[in-house]
């Protein structure tokens, strides 16, 4: 990988292009790029043969022995574009011109681009971007009046990301299961000859005691599960306290700034850890870097200033001069949650300490995990705190998650397209050129040797797939890495015996959307193959009556299953029995756990926010990715297809057995009982379904007899 230098040579034949800003950005994981360069020269000139329009001449030259690489040049030139100061409708950001450049060593190419110039040329502004997967160089341009004779060259600056550690471990004794092999094959096919970007397979990993972070959320006399939300939030604070170099935290939102006492989650849990980290950091450094990112939703979330204030309120009280703080803190919003001008926004829930420890799952930074909503039961039911699931690990999968967040973080380093939610506030001073973002150019050193984190080794091994998805570019239009989507479908398609799913919902009816077609077909195909599918879903809670109930979801699934089963088994001599068996193999139950210290009545809603599935009791997923439209891609969900998601698929028999025993089985004992209440109307007369099997109806009050 190498730097891409962009130079602008101005020829004043028509209006002058004034260089407003230039930045080269390079991301390097383990080693600096070679010194070979590719040069881009742009000239504005007159060309009467093009009807009096100005012509932009683009010349690309690769004079050295640079690696062969593909680049995409985007030219944006728009009348009245207020760069970096205001959001504009999405369609105004479509490039007037784009070209993919493939340069061999010593190669060159050039293009003539006709650019219409309006009478009031001084109002034209724009940008030229040259984009390669890990490198974005840009020229911000303004067409000035004919009497302008000066050109200004801005200084260059590199946004150098941290260099994560290498992790070593003994060779893995366990082979990938058929599920893991299918996922690896899907990722390899998706990326082809390209390097993996958001998703990868790791082996050097260990799972500490208490790695299953399931969150009951309420204090009960007897709770069969392992932790509550207070424990989870303390774990995030503990990771901050253990940070030597860099801590990165990603969530959907922060929204407790207006709360007091323990209800201000950021002040209660994180601020003491930030102060303690400052106190224990040597005066000579390096000074740990703490980064916090969340989605931009101005009507709901705390602002960047408010989050930074809450994080540092104890630190500021002890040391009012922020220049003397021995920690560096940045708070950024990534993407804007808006149905009017949607942009790729962050939905991942990840905490990473030194690329070494990771907590990944569905937990948000939200009081909904601690405080029940006491509602008027004559109008609506009481909603208990959210139930959720995350996991804690150490090793190369933590590095993979950290690199994923690095790449998401890069998207806020761009004052050009403000609708991407690039607002960022930092505790260190920023250059005036980049006042709207948080580059690391001026941050104090947070690790030695060019901010390279030290390598380490582990004695344990476990197959962990880090599955990330989302927008890959700074541009508002561009590629979305959906490798995680491919991996999820591949896991379902590899099922031979069982699929267990625990989710909030599978449909998104409030946007007139149904199932994700790929998810629905993968489930139905598995059932037809003989796989037992058990699904736990919440009663509607997040969107009132706009979300379909588990019964409604079941009705849709079972109707489609029956239609497909009739065709699938049409030529079998025992088709009726095979169809009945298939109908009973599909179970959907309303999520419930009896550890809640409240009466079990219809006026109490038990919300489930987990994103979990397990295949063949061998491989399982925990993360932020929902299986309904918007969480996983399809042509029907382009409005939110760029959501950033992250999760782990663990392919390990021992770990799968543990999470099945401690998490899934207690959950399904009660959720499954409710699944028995939902019966397929297409089932043959005289039979019904119980626990996934066909039962003779006449033996209901006698020991159950299978058909």
Image (cartoon, rainbow, N blue to C red):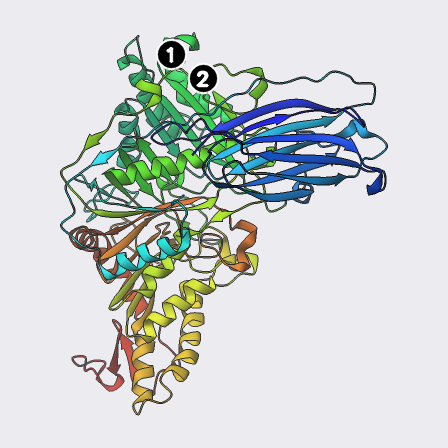
Residue 2: x %, y % from top left: 45, 31
Residue 237: x %, y % from top left: 30, 28
Left or right? Give the position of 694 relative to 161: left
- Of the pair 86 and 268, the residue shown nearer to us: 86
Please give the residue where the numbered disc 1 appears in the rendered image: 325
Residue 316: x %, y % from top left: 41, 12
Q: Are marks 1 and 2 in contact (CB under 8 Å)?
A: yes
Picture quarter with the N terminus: top left
- Of the pair 387 and 471, the residue shown nearer to us: 471
Give the residue displayed 32% in from the left and 89% down from the top: 572
Secondary structure beneath dot 1 equals loop
Please give the residue where the numbered disc 2 appears in the rendered image: 427
Residue 152: x %, y % from top left: 67, 17
Residue 672 in which image quadrant: bottom left
Left or right? Give the position of 169 relative to 244: left
- Of the pair 590 and 567, the residue shown nearer to us: 567
Mark sitting on residue 269: none
């Amino acid at each position: 990988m190498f730097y891409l230098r962009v130079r602008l040579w101005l020829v004043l034949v028509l209006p002058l292009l004034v260089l407003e800003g230039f930045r080269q950005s390079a991301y390097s994981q383990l080693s600096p790029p070679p010194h070979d360069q590719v040069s881009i020269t742009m000239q504005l000139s007159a060309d009467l043969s093009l009807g009096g329009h100005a012509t932009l001449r683009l010349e690309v030259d690769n004079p050295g022995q640079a690696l062969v690489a593909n680049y995409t040049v985007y030219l944006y030139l728009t009348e009245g574009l207020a760069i970096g100061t205001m959001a504009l409708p999405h369609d105004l950001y479509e490039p007037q011109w784009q070209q993919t450049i493939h340069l061999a060593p010593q190669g060159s190419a050039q293009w003539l681009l006709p650019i219409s110039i309006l009478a009031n040329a001084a109002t034209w502004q724009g940008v030229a971007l040259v984009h390669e997967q890990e490198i974005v160089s840009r020229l911000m341009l303004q067409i000035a009046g004919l009497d302008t004779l000066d050109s200004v060259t801005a200084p260059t600056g590199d946004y150098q990301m941290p260099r994560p550690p290498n992790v070593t471990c003994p060779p893995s004794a366990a082979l990938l299961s058929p599920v893991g092999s299918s996922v690896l094959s899907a990722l390899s096919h998706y990326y082809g000859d390209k390097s993996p970007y958001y998703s990868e397979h790791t082996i050097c990993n260990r799972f500490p005691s208490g790695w299953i972070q399931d969150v009951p959320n309420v204090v009960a006399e007897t709770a069969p599960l392992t932790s509550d939300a207070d424990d989870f939030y303390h774990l995030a604070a503990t990771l901050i306290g253990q940070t030597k170099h860099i801590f990165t935290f990603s969530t959907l939102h922060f929204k407790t700034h207006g709360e007091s006492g323990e209800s201000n989650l950021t002040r209660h849990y994180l601020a003491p850890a930030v102060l303690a980290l400052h106190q224990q950091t040597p005066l000579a450094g390096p000074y740990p870097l703490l980064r916090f990112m969340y989605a931009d939703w101005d009507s709901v979330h705390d602002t960047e200033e408010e989050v930074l204030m809450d994080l540092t309120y104890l630190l500021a009280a002890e040391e009012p001069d922020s220049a003397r703080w021995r920690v560096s803190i940045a708070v950024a919003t990534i993407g804007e949650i808006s149905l009017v001008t949607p942009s790729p926004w962050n939905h991942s829930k990840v905490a990473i300490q030194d690329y070494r420890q990771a907590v990944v799952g569905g937990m948000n930074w939200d009081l909904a995990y601690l405080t029940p909503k006491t509602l008027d039961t004559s109008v609506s039911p009481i909603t208990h705190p959210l139930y959720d699931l995350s996991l804690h690990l150490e090793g190369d999968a933590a590095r993979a998650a950290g690199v994923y967040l690095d790449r998401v973080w890069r998207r806020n380093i761009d004052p050009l397209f403000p609708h991407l939610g690039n607002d960022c506030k930092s505790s260190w001073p920023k250059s005036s050129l980049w006042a709207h973002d948080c580059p690391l150019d001026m941050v104090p050193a947070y690790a030695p040797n060019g901010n390279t984190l030290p390598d380490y080794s582990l004695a344990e091994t476990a197959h962990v797939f880090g599955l990330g998805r989302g927008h890959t570019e700074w541009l508002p239009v561009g590629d979305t890495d959906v490798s995680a989507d491919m991996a999820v479908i591949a896991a379902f398609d590899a099922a031979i015996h069982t699929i267990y799913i625990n989710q909030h919902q599978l449909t998104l009816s409030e946007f007139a959307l149904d199932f994700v077609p790929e998810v629905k077909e993968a489930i139905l195909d598995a059932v037809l193959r003989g796989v037992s599918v058990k699904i736990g879903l919440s009663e509607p809670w997040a969107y009132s009556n706009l979300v379909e109930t588990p019964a409604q979801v079941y009705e849709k699934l079972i109707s489609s299953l029956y239609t497909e089963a009739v065709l699938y088994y049409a030529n079998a001599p025992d088709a009726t029995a095979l169809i009945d068996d298939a109908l009973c193999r599909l179970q959907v139950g309303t999520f419930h756990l009896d550890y809640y210290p409240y009466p079990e009545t219809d006026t109490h809603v038990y919300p489930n926010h987990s994103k979990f599935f397990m295949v063949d009791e061998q491989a399982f997923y925990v993360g932020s990715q929902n299986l309904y439209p918007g969480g996983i891609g399809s042509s029907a969900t382009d409005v939110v297809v760029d959501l950033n998601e992250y999760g782990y698929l663990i392919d390990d028999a021992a770990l799968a057995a543990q999470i099945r025993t401690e998490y899934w089985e207690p959950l399904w004992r009660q959720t499954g009982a409710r699944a028995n209440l939902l019966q397929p109307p297409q089932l043959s007369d005289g039979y019904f379904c119980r626990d996934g099997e066909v039962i003779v109806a006449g033996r209901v009050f006698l020991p159950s007899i299978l058909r």
